[in-house]
Image (cartoon, rainbow, N blue to C red):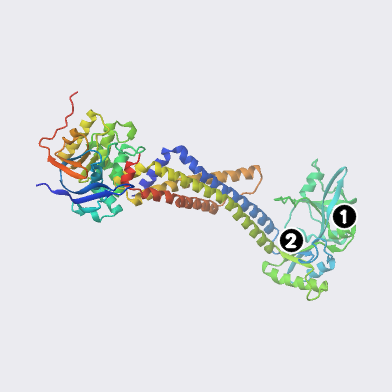
Amino acid sequence: MAENLIALENISKTYYGAGEPVYALRSISLNINSGEMLAIMGPSGSGKSTLMNLLGCLDKPDSGSYDFAGQDVMTLDKDQLANFRSIVIGFVFQNFNLIGRATALDNVCLPLIYAGVSSRKEREKRGRQMLRMVGLEGREHHLPRQLSGGQQQRVAIARALVNEPGMLLADEPTGALDSKTTVEIMLLLQRLNREQGLSVVIVTHEADIGLHCQRIVRLNDGLIVKDEIVTEPYLAKMQAG
Amino acid sequence: MDLFSSLKMAWQSLLANKMRSFLTMLGVIIGVGAVIAMVALSQGTASGITSRISSMGSNLLTISAGGSSGPIRGVSTSKLTNGDVEAIKNLPLVKYVASESSVNSATIAIGSNTWTTTVDGTAPELMTIKSWDTVQGAFFTASDVDSVNRVAVLGSTVVTNLFADGSSPLGQTIKINGLSFNVVGVLSTKGSSGPDDPDDIIYIPLSTAQQRLLGSTSVKSISVQATNEAALTPLKEYISTLLRQRHRLAATADDDFRIRDMAELLATIEDTTKMFTFLLGGIAGVSLLVGGIGIMNIMLVSVTERTREIGIRMAIGATTRAILTQFIIEALLLCFIGGIIGVFVGWGTSQLLSVFAGLTMKVEAWLIAVSMGFAIMIGLFFGYYPARKAANANPIDALRFE
């Protein structure tokens, strides 16, 4: 039996704007096990972005209870959340979000600086390891604009994993990539999940991406409408040639 | 987050916008440069004046006719006389006494060359009191004064104008207001720092001036050198009492003479130049302040532009404090680099002014330290608000920012 990583119970989040209040999440409960590869899917406005922000500890729910690896997230303040997410969560975004004027290696090492690893040697050693792991050895000193989209996303994944977080949270990680590179990235994520036991949560609207995961949670109108196990997940394969 | 990483990050983001960083820095460069050049100018001028005055001797008292609250100065009816001078010579604590009486615009002629200058009748002690030197010949002697000899000692400006052909003035005969004088000495150049040229003067024995040129036994001023600096205060008292007695002043009457000591004069001048330093430094400081506002402006633009970057940094673990530090360091770095360049600009301007305009400039270490310190404080002050704005950004909104 896999260990429980995240336990969300009766989570609600409401946005009060100019007009009617927006009930983004209405009392949802969700458990995610350690080592799971899970997709969160739903149309726009379904609350999946809100759920992702909550899972990523970028925001706190209005009510409910949220337990992340034994830590009660509800009690953390803004800076404690920042410290917490830098240790337990790695983020990957649709448009990579690398710092443009920093090299691939500097981008990967950035979370280590914020996590307080003060030895530059140590940081660069771990940064290089991460880049090797995502297959970018030799590109350490390239700037993001000198890399292809797929390579940039690999740098972003390396950066997300450099602090050895328990969970990788990917927001439309292949949304800006062509089909070939999409396969490469999914292959990498599946490999990390399988070989290192990394929990991966992917927020996506692409059905195909969801089918690469072991479990799909579908949201609509702030509620979980379906929570299904994918019996035979697609295995991403490099196309021949 | 360690300092080296912060500095490296700040450096990278300044390099990303080189032109903008430079223009922002320009405000600080001009501000610091102006502060240094302005203060160096007033400091240089002040030190020039004070060193000249202290070279005259600090144990010096100068007595002049006319009280401080008497009739219009210069047309005072009161007079100092040879008798006063002799009486002062007999006071205790007195080392040297030299009185002066001058003709303000005498016509000097040698052959067809003429020159108008001041002719000062005095005693040989004046040379000792003011520690002057002669480059040719010697100052006239006490026996010249006793015998009312027609001898003259020339200042270097007079020599240049009357002996333009380079011939030696020694032993030559010049005419002062039509009277023949024999040149016995030439004084070394004292140099000028203002409109008054201290070398444009001729010295002759006081007796000769009084009897041949002025026809009066009054003296304009008396210079008294005390035995030491501590003697100045009691000596001033003695002289005052003596002169009041000799001039038969009633107990309630004001003095009809003025005694000034050099230390007092020095203090007055130092106060004035200090005020000038603050004034000029203050004006230049305003431009530094404007430079600081420029930095704040650009930092605010930069924070808005980089909202997304701030979001990314927060998502990967940057705390409020880390973001705050990063932007403050960027502002500080701008001011620090601008300040260093400004120091060189100010120093260079000072050099140029001293070489081409002949001004005395004094760039001291404390001046560089103060203006750098001020620049850094400006960076801290004007960098804080934009940095605060960046640090308070909400990571979700910041990430969504296009």
Determine whether the residue tagged by mark 2 lies in a helix, strand or loop: helix
Q: Residue furthest bottom?
A: B251
Residue B400 in the image, given as x and y percentages of width and height? 32, 41
- Residue picked out by circle 1: B150
The location of residue A4, given as percent across then percent down, is: 14, 49
Tell me residue A207's x, y (percent): 18, 34
Quadrant position of residue B311: top left
> What label sits on residue A101 in the rendered view?
none
C-alpha distance separating marks 1 and 2: 23 Å
Three-letter code for the amino acid on which mark 2 is drawn: Ile
Residue B129, numbered label: 2
Image quarter in which the C terminus of chain A is found: top left
A10 or A190: nearer the eye?
Answer: A10
Looking at the image, residue B57 lies above or below residue B349: below
Q: Dot 2, how many residues are within 10 Å of its Cα: few (below 14), some (14-19), or many (20+)?
A: many
Pinpoint the chain carrying mark 2: B
